Image: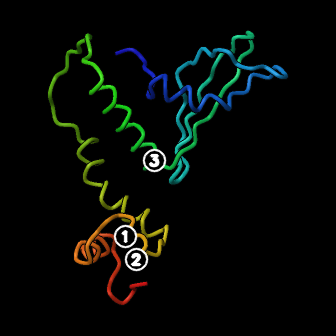
């Protein structure tokens, strides 16, 4: 399998606005973007894209996102791509169990709970109104988020 970009061009175009090539006052009319390197720093993922500017200089741009935001962006980009048109290419795969995928799926709940506990968000009635939840739905939501009745704001 060949190396591919992990984000579509329309997403890269948005984040490439901060590209630096080293040429003063360059407007970056176009960028040739190469395969990125990915670094994870606690809850943040940094994706560093090397690029070559239309002025001929090489540079890079960095996309730094919370891991859950990156997952949300990737999922929505995949959904948009899948719903906009059917792929004309094909791929041969060999179905088998993946221990890594199974572990990631098993770990997801504990990872999300850990991140939610680190954030310490106070939920208010205005949040309930914004989400358009009834009192019963709101209490269920609060319990799922780990708030007990004693911690009610």
Q: Could you tell me which residue is drawn at 22 percent across and 37 percent down?
A: 98
Q: Residue 112 vs residue 94: left or right?
A: right
Q: Position of residue 116 (x, y in %)?
A: 42, 65
Determine the residue located farthest toward the bottom in the rendered image: 150
Q: Which residue is mark 2?
A: 125
Secondary structure type for disc 3: helix
- Which one is in front in this view, the residue at disc 3 or the one at disc 2? 2
Image position, residue 117 (x, y; %)? 43, 70
Specify which label sits upstream in the sequence, 3 or 2.
3
Answer whether labels 2 and 1 touch (C-beta < 8 Å): yes
What residue is at 56 percent from the left and 18 percent from the top?
A: 34
Q: What whole-number distance in Å separates the C-alpha atoms at marks 3 and 1?
A: 24 Å
> Mark 1 sits on what residue?
129
Q: Spot the residue most to the left.
A: 95
Residue at 42% across, 20% down = 4
Give the quarter of the image for residue 19. top right
Marks 2 and 1 sit apart, C-alpha to C-alpha, by 6 Å
Q: Earlier in the sequence, mark 3 or mark 1?
A: 3
Q: Quadrant of residue 131?
A: bottom left
Q: Which residue is mark 3?
A: 69
Using residue 132 as the reference point, say whether residue 31 is left or right of it. Answer: right
Q: Nearer the viewer, residue 21 or 95?
A: 21
For residue 16, above or below residue 148:
above
Tally of marks: 3
């Amino acid at each position: 399998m060949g190396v591919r970009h992990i984000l579509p061009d329309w997403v890269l175009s948005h984040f490439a606005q901060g590209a630096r090539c080293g040429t003063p006052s360059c407007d970056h009319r176009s960028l040739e973007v190469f395969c990125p390197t990915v670094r994870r720093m606690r809850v943040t993922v940094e994706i560093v894209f090397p690029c070559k500017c239309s002025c001929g200089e090489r540079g890079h741009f960095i996309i730094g996102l919370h891991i859950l935001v990156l997952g949300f962006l990737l999922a929505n980009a995949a959904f948009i791509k899948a719903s906009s048109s059917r792929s004309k290419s094909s791929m041969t795969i060999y179905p088998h169990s993946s221990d890594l995928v199974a572990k990631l799926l098993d770990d997801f709940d504990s990872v999300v709970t850990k991140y939610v506990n680190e954030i310490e968000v106070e939920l208010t009635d205005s949040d309930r109104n914004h989400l358009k939840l009834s009192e019963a739905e709101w209490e269920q939501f609060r319990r799922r988020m780990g708030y007990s009745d004693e911690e009610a704001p």
